[in-house]
Image: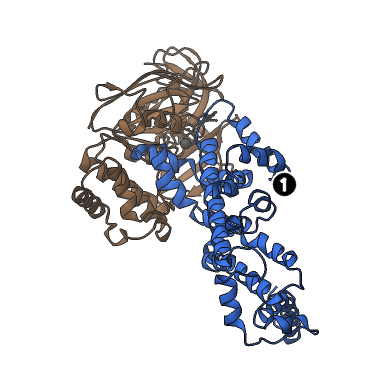
Chain colours: A brown, B blue
Amino acid sequence: MASITLKDLVKTYGDVEVLHHVDGAIEDGEFIVIVGPSGCGKSTLLRMVAGLETVTSGEIRIGEKVVNQLEPADRDIAMVFQNYALYPHMSVRENMAYGLKIRKIGKAEIERRVQEAADILEIGPYLDRKPRQLSGGQRQRVAMGRAIVRNPQVFLFDEPLSNLDAKLRVQMRLEIRKLQQRLGVTSIYVTHDQVEAMTLGDRLMVLNGGYVEQFGTPIELYDRPATLFVAGFIGSPSMNFLPATAGGGALILGNGASLQGAGHASGSVTLGIRPEHLLPDENGPIRVSVQLFEQLGANTLVHGVLEGTETDVVASLPGHVSADPGTIMGFTAPAKDLHVFDPATGRRVEE
Amino acid sequence: MIENRPILNIVSHVVLIFGVLIVALPIWITFVAATHDPVRMTQAPIPMLPGGYFWENFKQTLFGGGLSGTETAPVWRMLLNSLFMALMISFGKIAISLLSAFAIVYFKFPFRMGFFWLIFITLMLPVEVRILPTFEVVADLGMLNSYWGLSIPLIASATATFMFRQVFLTIPDEMLESARIDGAGPMRFFWDILIPLSRTNIAALFVILFIYGWNQYLWPLLITTETDMTTIVMSIKQMLEAAEQSPQWNIIMMTALLAMIPPVFVVVAMQRLFVQGLTETDK
Ligand SMILES: Nc1ncnc2c1ncn2[C@@H]1O[C@H](COP(=O)(O)OP(=O)(O)OP(=O)(O)O)[C@@H](O)[C@H]1O
Ligand SMILES: [Mg+2]
């Protein structure tokens, strides 16, 4: 078990810099999720920690040791790949034992560890099968088993659930989380699925275009997104963004409506309000011309535009709601749920 | 093309049987000729049914002096020579091309692609093209009339290198990466992962190369002068010319029959792997 420190990490491929000065301190036993859109550099960052990609500049420490120059095998890590990367010609047992065999661990000890991992993951009955004789979910477990038997200081996961169907993904997600809590191994988990990220991570590192947008707990990210990108990325359906003008503690929307709660902001800003924070109110200042309803059962999504403008607005209301298209609905939003961003920098305007 | 019309079935069977007959007829004649006495073989028309001299011919060919009145090695000796040569060629080719493909695919060294193309253009230089310089080199190295001389000049193989390169390229990178995390060094990865994953391709290639080696004619003819080192394929031709009197067809045909056995054995024994190796794609 160990902490991981990333210091000023840079990765370039040829002339292209794909990771820009990434910093982060991961504590012993923490479950960190790296999340971001496709191509933002998540896998690259993870693979640098694993030692599969070289570090262009900066420093990676596992525990107290700088590992920049160490081979993957010497970093005391285990990795679970998206396509599992099981050795097709070895049985499940051999797959799990291979790394231990190379480390010259005794036969009895190997057998004990494999058995233990198989019990934890409930893959005992398949130990003598080849990977191709297993279902996707079972292969996933074997890949995890291969990581567990090594007793590593760090687990690295690169989108390990993306090849599974939706239901199995939810189930495996819980299992990974339970397993990690039980073993207490520091883990880094890469995904582009924000729900997976929110439910799994102790803390989330949101990457965008090779920059760290924000690094914090899921609740911090939800309650106080540091940038427009994080605000739009975390939460589903995603946050509404309304252009507004701030001044004297008030916000004037595009159609002239006025809201309280701008803090110290002034000039033109972007106002963010989550759909679930829009409260129906006959006389509310946010007036929406309704276009359509999405009935989700427990709640209803109201899609429309801010009256008199082209700005899309989505509201999530509890229970069943319906009205004719074209109806004007009024909403309010509590001042604490208003997020004000500087449209030029995309950063949050602090209260 | 699954149709259920009886006429079509009959037609396709007739076509297939006809094809089989065309292929099988020469082999049948060889077999029949090997079972008669020499006198019967000189009379026309040639017999189409087996005679009663199979064992005599067999013994005389395999263990006797072979053809009467000539200085050839016994056929068992030639079979052994051919076998050594074919095995050395096929194992040598497979080992060398596996290693060169491994180097080209998995190691980054200067001029990597240059070396690859260098190997590739040797496709244009089969032994027949470079036969005189190669002979010179082999002679200078004192390898005439030896198994080394028979096999080494034929061992380098661009085709096999190219094929293994393609096979290795289909193996996902993650396989190498997880082996690295597991702590496997390059040679360990080669033995434990690459070789087992290319098993069927190796088998398929072995079949092809064994037959290639077995059928070598020109090269052994050139570099073997001692009768003890002659291979069976070249001696069949020599037997035809050797005798002053008319050819002893029974012995020659028996030799041909014996020469067919090892390749047939290899093909039959490795058939399943062979087909898998040429068709299987999923890794
Ligand atoms: N070997 C390489 N050579 C050049 N560019 C690369 C290489 N590998 C990755 N990149 C670039 O680095 C960037 C980050 O890639 P990376 O694989 O880390 O993305 P990712 O966030 O994991 O995306 P995804 O969610 O699609 O897996 C991409 O723009 C990609 O084009
Ligand atoms: Mg990726």
Find residue B240 and report its image quarter.
bottom right
Q: Is residue B13 above or below residue A165?
A: below
Residue for point 28% across, 45% down: A101
**Label 1: how many Cα within 10 Å (few below 14, some 14–19, many 20+):** few
Q: Residue furthest right?
A: B44
| Of residues A137 and B171, the one drawn nearer to the viewer in this rendering | B171
Give coordinates of residue B125: x percent, y percent. Answer: 70, 41
User: Horizontal placement of A32 versus A37: left or right?
Assistant: left
Give coordinates of residue B190: x percent, y percent. Answer: 44, 43
Give coordinates of residue A312: x percent, y percent. Answer: 55, 34
Q: Which residue is mark 1?
A: B128
Give coordinates of residue B122: x percent, y percent. Answer: 67, 39
Q: Quadrant of the N terminus of chain A?
A: top left
Find residue B72 and report its image quarter.
bottom right
Residue for point 43% across, 25% down: A54
Tell me the chain of label 1. B
| Of residues B107 and B125, the one drawn nearer to the viewer in this rendering | B125
Q: Quadrant of the C terminus of chain A?
A: top left
Inspect the image, locate mark 1, and give the three-letter code of the amino acid beneath it: Glu
Q: Answer yes or no: is residue A283 visible.
A: no
